[in-house]
Amino acid sequence: MGNDGFTRRGFLKGAAWGVAGAGAAALGLPGCAPKAKEPSAAAAGSQQADDLLWTARINPQDEDYRGTDSDLATLFSPWSLGSIGLSHRMVKSAAGSACYLAGLTDELFQYYLNFARGGVELIWVEGEAFSIPEDGSEVPRETSAFFRRLADECASFGASLGLQWAPFGRPVDSLTVDQIHSIEDKGAATAVALKDMGFKAIEINAAGFNQGELFNSRFHNTRTDEYGAQSIENRARFVCETIRKIKDACGGDFAVQVLLDAIEENDNLDNNATLMTLDSQVTDPFSKAMTIEESIALAKLFEKAGADSLHLRLGPLNNHPCQFASDLYFILAGIEGATGFGTVFDFDRHFQGLLDGSHSGAGMLLDVAARFKKEVSIPCGVVTYMDPAHAPEFFERALADGKCDFYVLNRPLTVDSDYVGKLREGRRDEIAPCTRCLHCHAGSNEMNAAMSYCRVNALTQRVMRQGGPSSYELPALKEKKRVAVVGGGPAGMEAARIAAARGHEVTLYEKSGALGGAVSFASTVKGPHENLDDLVAYLARQCELAGVETVLGTEVTAQVLAEAAFDAVVFATGAKRPALEVDGAAVVELADFMAKDLGEDVVVYGSSAQAFDAALWLTVRKKRVTIVTPDGVDALDMQQSMHAKRFMTSALYALGVKVYTESDIVSGSEGSLRVSSRAMGVEVDVPCDTVVNAGTWQADTALADSFAGEKFAVGDCAAPFNIALAIRSGNDAGRAI
């Protein structure tokens, strides 16, 4: 919501989303040995700790937390948020819906309604979906009608709506007292309009870069008057006055929730200071990060002012995605704790040592929330991969032990809007898993429209848009056909399950002995964080439920297809990687690199996410890695989300991985590789014992071209890129047959 031209999304697009460059500070503290811990199971595999880089020992992982033996009795127990009665402890956060801000469209309407249909009982709508007119006039009739209808239809499924009010923060020292009161009044007016449209609650976003946080935090607040940082009461004044004004305007039955940073830490050593400056610009922020004691003191004042609940999240001061998706700190297997700025958090020390850094980000703030629970009497909810289907015993026990009152979910619900209903009915194996890739979140409305999508759910952020399906419902079957799907990777499994769900008779062929394709290999390289094994299991289960006949260990040829007389064939046979031959150098294919003795100096050839994943795997295992690619800078790791790319590149560069773009391998000799760089205009000698060929995949439609009937080429065999686009193409093919 704008203030003198400032907008939250516009700021994030311009200031907070760049990939950290090669100049990032070195990981850790030079000369300080990390304390001895057991290595991450994800990174270590069967290796000993001494075989791994020190980063693998900073935040060791416990991979045994995913027990499923729980009746989830507490998760599905009743509670109340203010006057809103709820039958379970899972709430949809407001995050993510800005991806749908193309106006008051049917897509936006159905996006929220799907959560209600799926069993979510409290749905927070993102603030940018609605704002009262800046001139103070009445809400337009079209807007009121849209949200009244949405509230009514959600209510028919037992769901209530709340809106997250997130006034983007102007620097607090620039505001007059009258301007502060004006912002507060706008919050109250927004609440009145919401109540009139059938909403039951408002959430004051006083976290991140929003106005409330700029008053709350000593890092931002430089005022010296009654709204300044001299006391907790002064810092809380803006939020407290807003709560009281909302309650006065709407009555006690209209719920007010406050979202706040539960604990802060500075994550950017440079902190935007001028180069070569060694003064308070660099040093002061470390003393100004908000402690949990400060945040609890603020929360007590919010409760006293009339807040009905708290929504607690993390407060890294610069990396916005990690404020609500703190599991990004674990996206790099073997560098768990990477900050995105070329440094590493030690969760036994940073954030006052209060974060649970042992479960790959799952339930990371539960112990923090437990501290709040002891000090306030209103319900406390907590965010960051709170996914009970992922680890039922773990999340049920936290609720039963009173660590928090409810979980705030976003990604698990946007991946599968039927999540709550399936979990309640004991169908956990039918829930589409979030793979925590963060493709779903980009930094502005424009970027959302162009870049955001779900890796697993081919409909999310595609339905009712140009090039996407026209509806969530599957097309009616005009004629039942015998369909073959050749290839059991994600594209093939998605095509098979959709075609079978529509009523076709489907046979899925996979030449290996297991489903999964390249995703299974990716899981081995990446480790368990991205839940890729869960994705394969989910797709296989969906094929089983849809009645797909699966044939393993069978390679399909053109002759086999001709003899079987299928009516339609979906080809998901994968891509091919061009051979790489280097005179005088040993070359190993990517598929074999983990099982080979590569020596100490390894060159990874290629620019894709596969190349970077291989470089990370090798670096963690103490190899000296160089990346050489004929592609330009724009192609580096482009298959991953902008957030994953940021973490990957900043960490690898800080650890000494050199990348030569627009470069070709000329020749090799013992222990060295000659590289010709078009970007630099020179040739360089790179230390090298082995070259790993992770060159760009190429489409391979040879088998598809040999088939004369109705056919579809999907996934990497048609257009190699990433898992998300493979699943998308499979879904489209299954709908088109």
Image (cartoon, grey):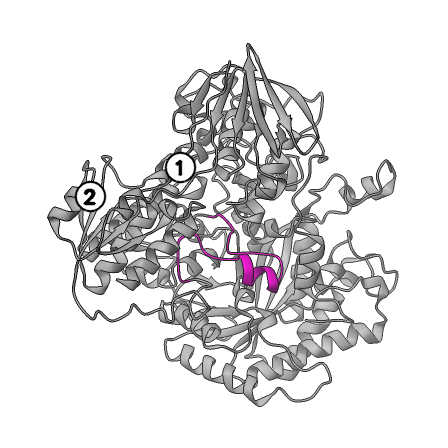
- Residue 69 on image: x %, y %: 30, 46
What secondary structure is the stretch in magenta mostly built from?
loop
Relative to the observer, which residue lies in front, 70 or 183?
A: 183
Q: Does the magenta stretch include residue 4?
A: no
Q: Residue at x 39, y 24 (%)?
A: 592
**Along the line of sight, the residue nearer the viewer: 255 or 357:** 357
The image shows residue 594 at horizontal and vertical percentages of 42, 24
Residue that label 2 marks: 558
Residues shaded magenta: 436-459
Among numbered discs 1 and 2, the one appearing first in the sequence: 1
Is residue 696 something one can see in this rendering? yes
* Residues packed near mark 2 inside 10 Å, few (<14), some (14 to 19) or many (20 plus): some
Whether residue 367 is situated above or below residue 310 in the rendered picture: above
Q: Which residue is drawn at the image coordinates 51% and 87% (left, top)?
A: 145
Count up the numbered dots: 2
Q: Nearer the viewer, mark 1 or mark 2?
A: 2
In the image: residue 560, left or right of residue 239: left
Above or below, comparing residue 197 to residue 531 in the picture: below
Question: Does the magenta-highlighted stretch encompass residue 453?
Answer: yes
The quarter of the picture where the N terminus appears is bottom right
**Cα–Cα gap, marks 1 and 2:** 31 Å
- Amino acid type for the residue under numbered disc 2: Ala
Density class for disc 1 (Cα within 10 Å; few <14, some 14-19, many ≥20) is some
Q: SS of the residue at dot 1?
A: helix
Q: In this view, does 102 lie above or below 265?
A: below
Q: Position of residue 425 (x, y in %)?
A: 27, 60
Looking at the image, residue 108 sits to the left or right of residue 78; the answer is right
Q: Which of 612 and 169 is in front in this view?
A: 612
Image marks 1 and 2: residues in contact by CB distance under 8 Å: no
Q: Residue 523 carries which label?
A: 1
What secondary structure is marked by label 2?
Answer: helix
Instruction: Name the kind of residue labelled 1 in the image.
Output: Ser
